[in-house]
Amino acid sequence: MAEKLLEVRSLTTGFAAGQGLVKAAEGVTISIDRGQTICLVGESGSGKSVTSLSIMRLVEFAGGMISEGSIRLGGEELTTKSQKEMSRIRGNKMAMIFQEPMSALNPVFSVGEQIAESIRLHQRTNAAEARRRAVDMLRLVGIPDPHIRAKQYPHELSGGMCQRVVIAIALACSPDLLIADEPTTALDVTVQAQILDLLRSLQRDLGMSILLITHDMGVAAQMADRIAVMYAGVIVEDGPAQDLFEHPAHPYTMGLLRSVPSMDGEREESLYTIPGTVPSLHQLPQGCRFHPRCQSAMARCAVESPPLEGVGPDHKTACWLYDNSAGSKEVLSK
Ligand code: SF4
């Protein structure tokens, strides 16, 4: 049986607002095996980034607070760690890369110095050894002439090269888990494909696990072993990637899949978009959070919140369409 690396259970993270807490992620449960890639998918505002920042315990620096739940990495509980302990875990056991490579790099230091600095921050090594390893890391992430590139500054490199440098910094200390938050969104399409290829080959070579945050089902299709779909702060579907693509259960997942451009070469007249927008966290609808946008909504959907339950082996969804216990299945007219 595969070994679990990350186990997140019933995680709730909120932001203080007035007298209460606005929950940006609620009851999130996901787990990642060693060497596995999980994609957390959903539109912006669905709670994906808050979930990933919570796992890193960086959400507290953005004013957030983990109010419930457990995060275990390699069996170690992270929610009770001090930030001093977390800074040792970040970089050594898990690392994160973000959407905008330029804003992750310091413009006044060469890229080689920045990688070496990351190595020295987390591991006992002298400056010369850290510089040598920085060049090795640039080579590992596919940067040509790494000795020359190591001396260059971020503005001298393309966006794709900068994202490779950011990946090199994240991997400098061989983390078990890499969290990548929309790592290709700011890049053009051909560079996107190269960065995804790079992540796949690094994962194969280094055996790390990846939690990939994306709004793009096309990216998830290329990368994921497993997919968790988030909507308005909750997981609405979770299952093995192939099963979820072949048999999507939740109407929101079906909508996301219909929004992906066709791969068969035929041009679609117009690309499908899910009607409406993700609700504000301050004004979440009662019942199923997706019901105002759902073409299959029934009367009970506006009143009762559906639990996440099995619809197949290892495949769960939160939708009343799969509950036969009670209530009319007549679809509400929209
Ligand atoms: Fe649609 Fe109802 Fe299922 Fe929500 S519970 S996704 S509103 S059918």
Image (cartoon, grey):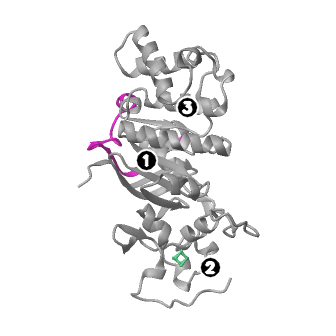
Q: Position of residue 301 (x, y in %)?
A: 53, 79
Horizontal side of 46 relative to 202 (left or right) equals right
10 Å crowding of disc 2: few (<14), some (14-19), many (20+): some
Circle on res. 155: none
Mark 1 element type: strand
Q: Foreground: 166 or 332?
A: 166
Mark positioned earlier in the residue sequence (2 or 3): 3
Q: Position of residue 84 (x, y in %)?
A: 38, 28
Mark positioned earlier in the residue sequence (2 or 1): 1
Quadrant the C terminus occupies: bottom right
**Could you tell me the amino acid type at mark 3?**
Arg
Report, in whole angstroms, how far the alpha carbon at label 2 lies from the one at label 3: 42 Å
Whether residues under marks 3 and 1 lie with C-beta atoms below 8 angstroms apart, the answer is: no
Looking at this rendering, what residue extends furthest in the front direction? Answer: 265
Ligand 1 within 8 Å, label 2 CB: yes
Q: Magenta segment, which residues?
A: 63-88
Mark 2 element type: loop
For residue 194, say whether it is visible: yes
Image: 189 above or below 95: below
- Foreground tag (3 vs 1): 3
Residue 241's image quarter? bottom left
Residue 282's image quarter? bottom right
Circle on res. 66: 1
Report, in whole angstroms, how far the alpha carbon at label 2 lies from the one at label 1: 34 Å
Q: Position of residue 57 (x, y in %)?
A: 43, 39
Image: 140 above or below 257: above
Mark 3 element type: helix
Give the residue at mark 3: 164
In the rendered image, residue 175 lying in the magenta stretch gets the answer no
**Could you tell me the amino acid type at mark 2?**
Gln
Circle on res. 295: 2
Report, in whole angstroms, how far the alpha carbon at label 3 lies from the one at label 1: 31 Å
